[in-house]
């Protein structure tokens, strides 16, 4: 019967990969398949009849296993599963797991046991490795400076490190494996562990749970009630759980806050600088721009950052800047003066500093570009230089200099109208003007109160506006009458007394504000014009004084005609002209007849009156080109311009008759007459004195031959009718 069982068992289990063992009730081996023999490293035949006890590495385990089959409550053994160490025939051991079941015969009597034996050494080794990995993981988690935790798919805590517990020290009691994430949060909320930022606890909890459930790896920042800040990043595990890292970023936040504060301070400083400050990367893209830069490039920071500022400039300007930026990108600091048309519509002369931003490796990450507007400085330098040239030159006269200063002012201020006014009482007169189409006419008068200059005179200092509509100028009558939007003017002071104003204006607003330099320029214009007007007045006074002195020095006090010295100077000039041009002239000597007798008989006052009437009569009868002078007491001389002998004789005869009719006096009982001697200029008359001597000789002949007649030098005296 045993053989038949063996045959059945072999047929049933012989080829199985599982190890099968059949024993009798005393655990003596009845059958073992090939797989078990391989496990125990023996021949299958050697196992039959062997006691299973010999294969237990620990004999005590054999006894313990036997007890499993003898239960006081149920004497019939049941199916059992257990694990123990077995010893092979070669002395090595291995771990096995055994599942056993009783075998009953047809009479329901226990006839033996069926054992299915599995080699679990590999599983045990794997479990050990897993255990080692878990320990290593725990050690690794503890080595992480951040807090780390893993929650399962039901959101229950699986594992966390001590740093995680330390971070949430008020929630430590709730941070145990198996605790739900929401419960841990609620536990902390009840202990005021979190700064909810003004939200209710329920609102804060709901927002936090939304982020936790997303677990998309995004970073969130969490503020604790004690002021600490955490950076949290949570991701989904393969099993559907959640792994999260908490890092204390309090110092980083504080450093960032300090950096942001410093950046704000730097930005505030940059925004209060009148220069354009920009930072661009190596591709020319703007990464920073200050307030002034935004104004020049006509945009907001949001519109300009991230764009190429250079592309906003005209192509000519881009060509100018390209070599500068290329040089700076090579690591060189570049400074240059350039003229640029900016997007705000203003052309500026600029001093450009291009500074490379060098990284730790020595490469250039970008450029910091500082642009200073030096338009006013350059313009002021040019204006002052030209003002000096105008005021110092001797090529221009007084009127021309004033005209040039008005032109220069219009160019400097970029305004069409320039005016110098003369103000007397409440009248404003255009003394000098400069305008593009002669719209302003010198001499035109306005009420002073209708002009901006009334404000300038009242302030007694320069005034200016670039947009009258947006200033107090809008309320002034001038704005309503003339609609002048731009004005700059200064009072003119001449010799300490207000004279008027110098001002420049335009009907449209000026794009650029007037600067302190502009105010100084118009003040200098006013000072120079005032000095020039005063100088011109002084010059005119000197010229008038000179003329008066010359007149005093050349005019005879009594007769108001040329005295001897002045007459001879003019006469010599005529001789020189005659020698150059050969234009003839005649010299005439005149003498009042019996003048001594008049003085002796009627007195010197009467004689002086005769001299005056005589001089006036002759002067009134002469042409403007003729020259007449007193060369002695009662002797006179005249030069008849471009006259020959016959013409001169006719003129003298007419003069003689004029004396007879115009020079008689009631108080002088004597006929007033005169004698004349004529001499026509000839080539031999090198000096006028020779010609005058000839005329004097002829006069002598006239006197000795009867007086009251005209005698030509070299001719015979003729009887002159009364």
Image (cartoon, helix red, strand yellow):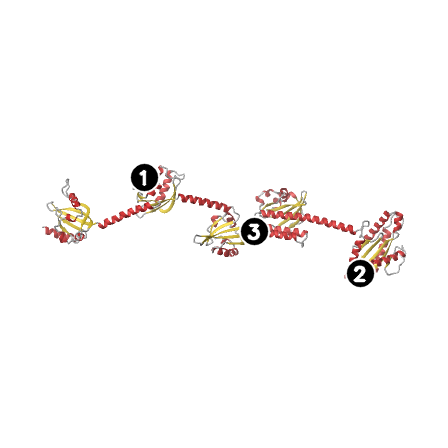
Judge the density around disc 2: few (<14), some (14-19), many (≥20) Cα neighbours within 10 Å: some
Left or right: residue 142 compared with residue 453: left
Residue 248 appears at what percent x and percent y? 38, 43
Residue linked to disc 2: 686
Residue 331 appears at what percent x and percent y? 47, 55
Q: Which numbered circle lies on residue 375?
A: 3
Q: Which numbered circle lies on residue 7?
A: none
For residue 412, say whether it is visible.
Answer: yes
Q: Earlier in the sequence, mark 1 or mark 2?
A: 1
**Residue lying farthest front?**
91
Residue linked to disc 1: 174
Residue depicted at x 43% and y 53%: 361
Report helix, strand or loop for mark 1. helix
Q: Nearer the viewer, residue 230 or 129?
A: 129
Residue 392 appears at what percent x and percent y? 65, 52
| Residue 581 sits above or below residue 150 on the image | below
Left or right: residue 531 compared with residue 86: right
Q: Nearer the viewer, residue 297 or 697?
A: 697
Q: Mark 1 or 2, which is nearer the eye?
A: 2
Q: Earlier in the sequence, mark 3 or mark 1?
A: 1
Q: Nearer the viewer, residue 354 or 589?
A: 354
Quarter of the C terminus within the rendering: bottom right
**Cα distance between the residues tagged 3 and 2:** 68 Å
Count of numbered badges drawn on the protein: 3
Report helix, strand or loop for mark 3. helix
Report helix, strand or loop for mark 2. loop
**Cα distance between the residues tagged 1 and 2:** 139 Å
Q: Contact (CB < 8 A) between labels 1 and 2?
A: no
**Residue lying farthest bottom?**
683
**Cα distance between the residues tagged 3 and 1:** 72 Å
């Amino acid at each position: 019967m045993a053989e038949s069982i063996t045959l059945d068992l072999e047929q049933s289990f012989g080829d199985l990969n599982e190890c099968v063992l059949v024993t009798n009730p005393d655990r003596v081996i009845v059958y073992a398949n090939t797989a078990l023999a391989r496990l125990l490293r023996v021949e299958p035949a050697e196992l039959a009849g062997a006691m299973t006890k010999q294969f237990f590495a620990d004999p005590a385990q054999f006894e313990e296993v036997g007890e499993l089959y003898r239960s006081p409550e149920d004497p019939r053994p049941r199916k059992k599963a257990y694990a123990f160490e077995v010893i092979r025939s070669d002395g090595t051991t291995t771990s096995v797991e055994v599942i056993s079941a009783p075998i009953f015969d047809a009479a329901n009597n226990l006839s033996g046991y069926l054992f299915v034996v599995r080699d679990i050494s590999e599983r045990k080794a794997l479990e050990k490795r897993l255990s080692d990995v878990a320990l290593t993981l725990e050690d690794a988690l503890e080595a992480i400076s951040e807090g780390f935790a893993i929650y399962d798919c039901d959101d229950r805590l699986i594992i966390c490190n001590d740093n995680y517990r330390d971070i949430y020290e008020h929630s430590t009691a709730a941070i145990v494996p198996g605790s739900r994430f929401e419960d841990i949060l609620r536990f902390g909320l009840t202990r005021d562990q979190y700064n909810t930022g003004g939200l209710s606890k329920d609102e804060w909890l709901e927002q936090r749970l939304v982020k936790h459930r997303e677990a998309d790896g995004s970073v969130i920042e969490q503020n604790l009630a004690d002021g600490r800040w955490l950076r949290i990043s949570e991701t989904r595990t393969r099993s559907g759980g959640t792994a999260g890292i908490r890092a204390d970023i309090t110092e980083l936040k504080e450093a960032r806050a300090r950096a942001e504060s410093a950046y704000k301070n730097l930005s505030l400083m940059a925004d209060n600088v009148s220069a354009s400050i920009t930072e661009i990367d190596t591709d020319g893209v703007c990464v920073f721009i200050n307030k002034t830069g935004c104004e020049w490039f006509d945009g907001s920071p949001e519109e300009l950052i991230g764009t190429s500022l250079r592309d906003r400039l005209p192509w000519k300007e881009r060509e100018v800047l390209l070599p500068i930026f290329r040089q700076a990108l090579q690591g060189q600091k570049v400074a240059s003066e350039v003229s640029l048309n900016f997007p705000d519509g203003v052309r500026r002369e600029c001093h450009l500093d291009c500074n490379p931003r060098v990284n730790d490796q020595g490469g250039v990450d970008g450029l910091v570009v500082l642009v200073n507007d030096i338009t006013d400085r350059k313009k002021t330098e040019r204006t002052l230089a030209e003002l000096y040239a105008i005021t110092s030159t001797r090529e221009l006269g007084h009127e021309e200099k004033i005209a040039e200063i008005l032109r220069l002012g219009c160019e400097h201020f970029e305004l069409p109208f320039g005016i110098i006014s003369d103000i007397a009482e409440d009248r404003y007169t255009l003394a000098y003007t400069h305008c593009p189409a002669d719209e302003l006419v010198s001499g035109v008068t306005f009420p002073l109160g209708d002009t901006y200059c009334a404000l300038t005179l009242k302030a007694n200092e320069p005034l200016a506006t670039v947009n009258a509509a947006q200033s107090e100028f809008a309320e002034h009558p001038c704005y309503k009458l003339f609609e002048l939007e731009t004005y700059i003017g200064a009072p003119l002071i001449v010799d300490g007394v207000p004279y008027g104003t110098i001002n420049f204006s335009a009907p449209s607003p000026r794009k650029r504000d007037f600067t302190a330099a502009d105010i100084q320029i118009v003040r200098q214009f006013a000072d120079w014009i005032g000095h020039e007007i005063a100088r011109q007045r002084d010059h005119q006074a000197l010229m008038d004084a000179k003329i008066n002195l010359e007149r005093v020095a050349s005019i005879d006090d009594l007769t108001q005609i040329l005295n001897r010295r002045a007459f001879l100077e003019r006469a010599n000039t005529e001789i020189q002209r005659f020698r150059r041009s050969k234009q003839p002239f005649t010299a005439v000597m005149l003498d009042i007849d019996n003048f001594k007798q008049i003085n002796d008989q009627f007195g010197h006052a009467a004689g002086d009156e005769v001299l005056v009437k005589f001089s006036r009569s002759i002067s009134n009868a002469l042409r403007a080109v003729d020259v007449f002078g007193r060369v002695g007491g009662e002797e006179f001389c005249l030069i008849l311009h471009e006259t020959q002998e016959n013409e001169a004789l006719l003129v003298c005869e007419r003069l003689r008759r004029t004396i007879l009719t115009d020079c008689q006096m009631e108080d002088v009982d004597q006929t007033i007459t005169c004698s004349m001697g004529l001499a026509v200029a000839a080539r031999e008359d090198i000096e006028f004195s020779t010609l005058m001597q000839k005329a004097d000789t002829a006069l002598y002949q006239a006197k000795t031959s009867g007086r009251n007649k005209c005698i030509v030098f070299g001719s015979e005296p003729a009887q002159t009718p009364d």
